[in-house]
Image (spheres, helix red, strand yellow):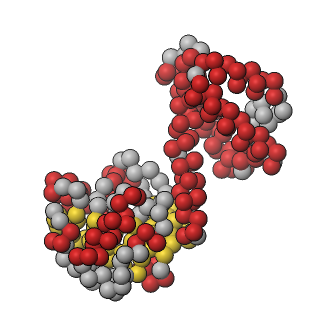
Amino acid sequence: MAPVLNLVGAGKVGRTLARLFAAQGTFAIGDVLTRSAASAEAAVDFIGAGRAVDRIDAMRPAAVWMLAVSDDQIGAACASLAARADLAGTIVFHCSGAASSQALAAANGAATASVHPIRSFADPAQVAAAFEGTYCGVEGDARALALLVPAFEAIGARTVPIDAAAKTVYHAASVFASNYLVTVLDAALRAYQAAGIPEPVARALAAPLAGESMANVFRLGAGAALTGPIARGDLATVARQQAALDAWDEPSGELYRALAAATTDLARRR
């Protein structure tokens, strides 16, 4: 029989993974605890399995515990769980990209790990339908990973071992590749609009530049993909753009200044 998995926290990541585990039969979903009874019921409906509970001491024993809570709540949730449940011989893991498995130190007697799916979970149903091939950064106790790695691979994940000591830098890599990329594109769209271009047209102008640049990075590497005034040594143009941005919008000017310094370093390293 499949091991029973209990969820503490079932937001977008937790409910997506639980739905996949339930559908594949990798784990039997047990109890689901979230911030409210209503959200727990909604999570169970989405997962298609499990029992909603409204307090941690109402949760039944399980072989595996997934703490799918926010990063800053992992330690507290683990301590609360350890105070109310016998974790000896169990596996406790979280899905954070920023925290290492050391955040689960309170889980006495349990083997602990971290498994971080490297993708956006803005639309859980869409992610669940297209999870195949998703990379997951994994680290933790060997006993925990011996169960979790095959379980995640069974739902289509590609697991990548990472250094727990560098977990924060690892997570920052995902922030650069996702969140900050959006911020940079927002600056580009606003700058186009400052030149009198309507927002929908601005997106149409930026799309091929952004898409081709990303494709070149992944095909050729960052250094070979770099083009533009810094790559060709046109520092006069960079200076004019810096002055214009400083006059137009100070935060955008500061962003440009920081990116120009980083891009100059990249150009030197090519």
Seen in the picture, residue 121 relative to 190 is either above or below; the reply is below
Quarter of the image where one finds residue 94:
bottom left
Please give left or right for residue 137 compared with residue 18 in the image.
Answer: right
Quarter of the image where one finds residue 152:
bottom left
Q: Nearer the viewer, residue 122 or 173?
A: 173
Residue 174 spot, x, y in % from top left: 54, 53
Please give left or right for residue 21 compared with residue 173 in the image.
Answer: left
Seen in the picture, residue 194 relative to 59 is either above or below; the reply is above
Quarter of the picture holding the N terminus: bottom left
The tally of labels here is 0
Q: Nearer the viewer, residue 107 or 30?
A: 107
Please give left or right for residue 130 compared with residue 223 in the image.
Answer: left
Residue 171 makes an appearance in the image: yes
Residue at position x 82%, y 28% from top? Answer: 234
Seen in the picture, residue 48 relative to 61 is either above or below; the reply is above
Please give left or right for residue 60 compared with residue 245 in the image.
Answer: left
Residue 116 spot, x, y in % from top left: 46, 63
Residue at position x 79%, y 36% from top? Answer: 231
Residue 92 spot, x, y in % from top left: 36, 75
Residue at position x 71%, y 42% from top? Answer: 262
Seen in the picture, residue 212 relative to 229 is either above or below; the reply is below
Q: Residue furthest top?
A: 196
Residue 171 spot, x, y in % from top left: 53, 57
Residue at position x 76%, y 24% from top? Answer: 239
Q: Nearer the viewer, residue 209 or 86?
A: 86
